Amino acid sequence: MGSTKVLAGARVVLPTGVVPDGRVVVEDTRIAATAPENAEVVDVSGHWLVPGFVDIHNHGGGGASFSGPVDDVLKAIRTHHLHGTTTLLASTVTDDMDFLVKQAGLLSELAEQGDLAGIHFEGPFISPCRKGAHSEELLRDPDPAEVRKLIDAGRGKAKMMTLATELPGGVDSVRLLAEQGVIAAIGHTDATYEQTVEAIEAGARVATHLFNAMPQIGHRAPGPITALLEDERITVELINDGTHLHPAALQLAFHHAGASRVALITDAMDAAGVGDGRYLLGPLEVEVSEGVARLVEGGSIAGSTLTLDRAFKRAVTVDGLSVEDVVAAISANPARLLGMDDRIGSLEAGKDADLVLLDHQFDLKGVMRRGEWVVDPQLG
């Protein structure tokens, strides 16, 4: 017989809204509809109970990288579990093709074991004009044959690839990704409005960290941001760390895309969950000072040190978003994008018991993944 526990008394955020004095029944690894009379009752009064967070863009944390050996990858995963992210993609960074193929094999094994939801390739098929913290000498045009090589290396676990779709081979690569069931994301791009529309029509479905590493909106040259915001088929990633985006830009995206089309991401690098110091992002050296990561050479922002519990709190307490909209952006929408919303992304019977407990100030107090406490709230 498995164990059943009832988390009772919290404000529970469901797809239908907030239940003020709600309860969630956890039976083994899943959420159940009902509980036996002798089930353990855990009093979580005074807290918020929300679904586990889903991060589709994450390069590492805990001093470790998803470009590292298996122990480093597991350390990074564990770090984000401790901050409420119960499901995540491992994002690579631009490197030579042989390394990326090898790393995809390692990451796919961990995805097969259930440690990761899959792989996101960010680079090398991006624009040197908008390279950000990617090594320019390793960038290349998106040749569909090379795109296919990375897809195959992922052994069915390649979930997303970021491309500058205006480059030669870009639109053909988008079509290939769509045919293979891999999400084509537009990012690190110097595309025009018209070129972005063409890529969307070809099958692109995500805006990689909207606003960052792309031309800004102009009244005569509206650029990719306008095209990405206006198309109902696009999910827009936002890095809500207070550095990558002004609060007004975040509000603009939520207003125009709507809460159902936003995915809050971390774009985290090694320093997430650790602190200031010197780190590597791929082959490039990064200095983290006061929580902001920048390349030592050139000073470009180099990912973030964000964790999704901080992104959640900021969205509610600084940006003034509703808890329901934040839950959609941090759990339900990315789960749906990944095609995993039958198992994760909301607190519904039959789904994985992935949940986060927040206090009244939206600070993280507990994390459960598949029915087990990763962060035990130690209540009463």
Image: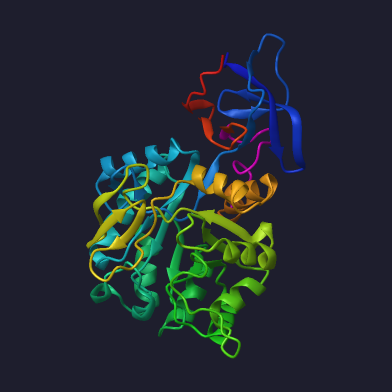
What residue is at 34 percent from the left and 62 percent from the top?
A: 302
Q: Position of residue 190 (x, y in %)?
A: 44, 81
Start-end of magenta stretch:
339-356
Residue at the limit of the structure toward the bottom, as seen here:
220
Quarter-wise, where is residue 162 in the image?
bottom left
Which secondary structure type mostly characterizes the magenta part of the structure?
Answer: loop
Residue 340 visible somewhere in the drawing: no
Residue 317 visible somewhere in the drawing: yes
What residue is at 37 percent from the left and 47 percent from the top?
A: 272
Q: Position of residue 275 (x, y in %)?
A: 32, 45
Q: Specify the quadrant that holds the C terminus.
A: top right
The answer to if 341 sits in the magenta stretch is yes
Horizontally, residue 240 falls left or right of residue 23, namely left
The answer to if 107 sits in the magenta stretch is no
What residue is at 42 percent from the left and 82 percent from the top?
A: 169
What residue is at 62 percent from the left and 65 percent from the top?
A: 253
